[in-house]
Image: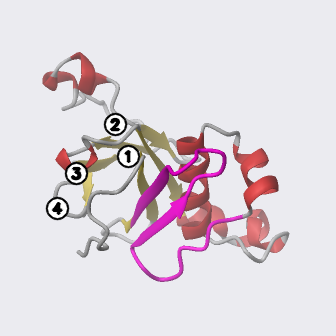
Amino acid sequence: MPEAFTLPAGWGAARLVPPGAAVRSPCAAAGPAAAGAPRAYDHEGAMLEWSPGPANAEAAAVACDLEHVGRFAGEADPARTDPRLSVRAWVATEVLAKLANVPILAFVRDCGVADPGDAPQLERALPGAGSERARLWLAVSADGRHVACFGMRCASLTDPTPATS
């Protein structure tokens, strides 16, 4: 059974589908617009599928990213070459790059790596996007093996207070 991620009220629903599982998207039943729901995959083939909610309705764009915590362990750990990287920082940076419509390596070169700290939410101005801002939500799977980031790009955020879980 796909595992769900906990998102703030209004942010919709997300699920993690294990590698190789038969996928019947609940988004497809919602119609053509939902069929293009944001998805991301980890290096083992697990799929994150997000059905954005009403809080994201005004967003100019939405994006998500998923990483398996094991990717950031051992010899393959990107933090060995760049200590700013953590799995939380990487998924946040990936989503910011997607929202800015910039390739990830160019985004890191020009803007650096996002630092989400320990908070589940991050808000940041987008480079070259005028007054547009990104709001991100980071979540960990129930088993602790995956970290996901969900984000929206808005001209202005209507709720300036951080969402809480």
Find numbered disc 4 in the image and state the secondary structure of the residue it sits on.
Answer: loop
Find numbered disc 2 in the image and state the secondary structure of the residue it sits on.
Answer: loop
Nearer-the-camera pick, 26 or 53: 53
Disc 1: CA contacts within 10 A as few (<14), some (14-19) or many (>=20)? some
Q: In the displayed structure, does residue 165 sit left or right of residue 125?
A: left
Examine the structure image and report whether residue 129 is included in the region drawn in magenta.
yes
Q: In the displayed structure, does residue 90 sit left or right of residue 61?
A: right
Does 133 sit above or below residue 165?
above
The residue indicated by pointer 4 is 9
Q: Position of residue 66 (x, y in %)?
A: 49, 52
The residue indicated by pointer 2 is 21
Does 22 sit above or below residue 100?
above
Which badge, 4 or 3, is on the more N-terminal residue?
Answer: 4
Q: Quadrant location of residue 98?
A: top right
Badge 2 vs badge 1, beta-carbon distance below 8 Å: yes
The residue indicated by pointer 1 is 18
